[in-house]
């Protein structure tokens, strides 16, 4: 399957390793190296992990992105855990390592109606981003960055949704590298049609990856709305929680 992320960039110079792939996509070529493989098709309980980037030459290949845990319009009711696949690690190189692949999303929900998930007991988690490769010598800025953590629950476009108190949504942790990468958001709302969201359980963003050079991206948001003009009514139940992850510093 192909994910929502783009393939990793291919190095056009001997100065860089390949970029990590987006969720479900292949990693880019590094100089004199092969692609990292794409993540496999998502299963009912866990997406397949992306393959590690190939070693070789000056630049290692980028890690493949992890596959999504579930893609569809009917959330499984008999699964206690739905997990996005982990991103592959960047390939080793004599000098310049490949970047880590992105973690797969826990759930990509494509339904467009009103969803009542109060009776579902499950944990939905985005995949961990792959680690970028660093040889341990030379300029650490030339090593591979970590892959971004996968989004926990990605709503394409639904009218309303109620998430039950026994449903836990967690964004994936960003991968480590010369630059630590952003953690996945707990929930991302992509469409303009979602106008009501009720949280009775817990939603948590993923932590960012650690960095060798002290440069890290932000930790994941609890909930992120992509369309700035979208109208959203957010209701929080008595035991409902929405938590953005705490950022962590680089080494």
Image (tube, grey):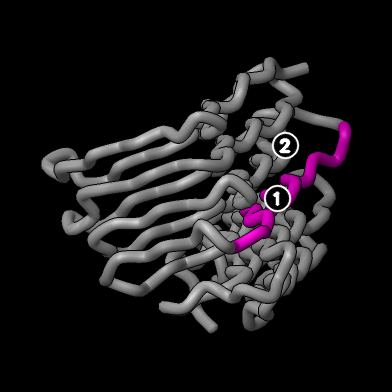
> Between 223 and 84, which is closer to the camera in this rendering?
223
* Dot 1 or dot 2, earlier in sequence: 1
Quarter of image, res 236: top left
Q: Nearer the viewer, mark 1 or mark 2?
A: 1
Give the position of the N terminus as an image quadrant. Answer: bottom right
Q: How far apart are marks 1 and 2 (CA)?
A: 13 Å
Q: Can residue 77 be seen in the rendering of this structure?
A: yes
From this view, report whether residue 213 is shown above or below residue 6. Answer: above
Range of residues picked out in magenta? 120-136
Residue to which mark 1 is pinned: 128
Q: Which residue is drawn at 68% across and 54% down?
A: 123
Q: Element at badge 2? A: strand
130 falls in the magenta region: yes
Name, please, the residue furthest toward the right. 136
- Give the image location of residue 110, x and y in percent: 37, 73
What residue is shown at x 28% (from left), y 57% (from top)?
Answer: 160
Q: Majority secondary structure of the magenta segment?
A: loop
Percent across and percent down for residue 230 are 16, 45
Q: Is residue 61 visible?
A: no
As drawn, the label of residue 177 is 2
Check disc 1 and report its element: helix, strand or loop: loop
Residue at 70 percent of width and 42 percent of height: 175
Which residue is situated farthest in the left direction here? Answer: 229
Residue 76 as seen in the image, left or right of residue 234: right
């Amino acid at each position: 399957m192909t994910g929502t992320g783009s393939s990793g960039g291919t190095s056009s110079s001997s100065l860089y390793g390949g970029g990590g792939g987006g969720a479900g996509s292949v990693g880019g070529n590094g100089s004199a190296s092969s692609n990292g493989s794409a993540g496999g098709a998502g299963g009912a309980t866990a997406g397949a992990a992306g393959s590690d980037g190939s070693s070789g030459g000056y630049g290692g290949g980028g890690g493949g992105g992890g596959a999504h845990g579930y893609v569809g319009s009917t959330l499984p009711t008999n699964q206690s855990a739905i997990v996005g696949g982990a991103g592959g690690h960047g390939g080793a190189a004599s000098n310049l390592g490949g970047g880590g692949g992105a973690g797969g999303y826990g759930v990509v929900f494509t339904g467009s109606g009103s969803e009542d998930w109060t009776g579902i007991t499950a944990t939905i988690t985005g995949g961990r981003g792959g680690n970028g490769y660093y040889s341990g010598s030379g300029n650490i800025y030339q090593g591979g960055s970590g892959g971004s953590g996968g989004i926990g629950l990605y709503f394409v476009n639904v009218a309303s949704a109620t998430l039950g108190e026994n449903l836990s949504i967690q964004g994936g942790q960003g991968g480590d590298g010369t630059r630590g990468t952003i953690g996945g958001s707990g929930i991302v709302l992509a469409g303009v049609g979602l106008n009501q969201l009720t949280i009775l359980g817990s939603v948590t963003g993923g932590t960012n990856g650690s960095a060798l050079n002290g440069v890290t991206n932000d930790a994941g948001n609890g909930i992120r709305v992509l369309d700035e003009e979208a109208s959203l009514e957010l209701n929080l139940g008595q035991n409902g929680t929405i938590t953005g992850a705490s950022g962590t510093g680089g080494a």
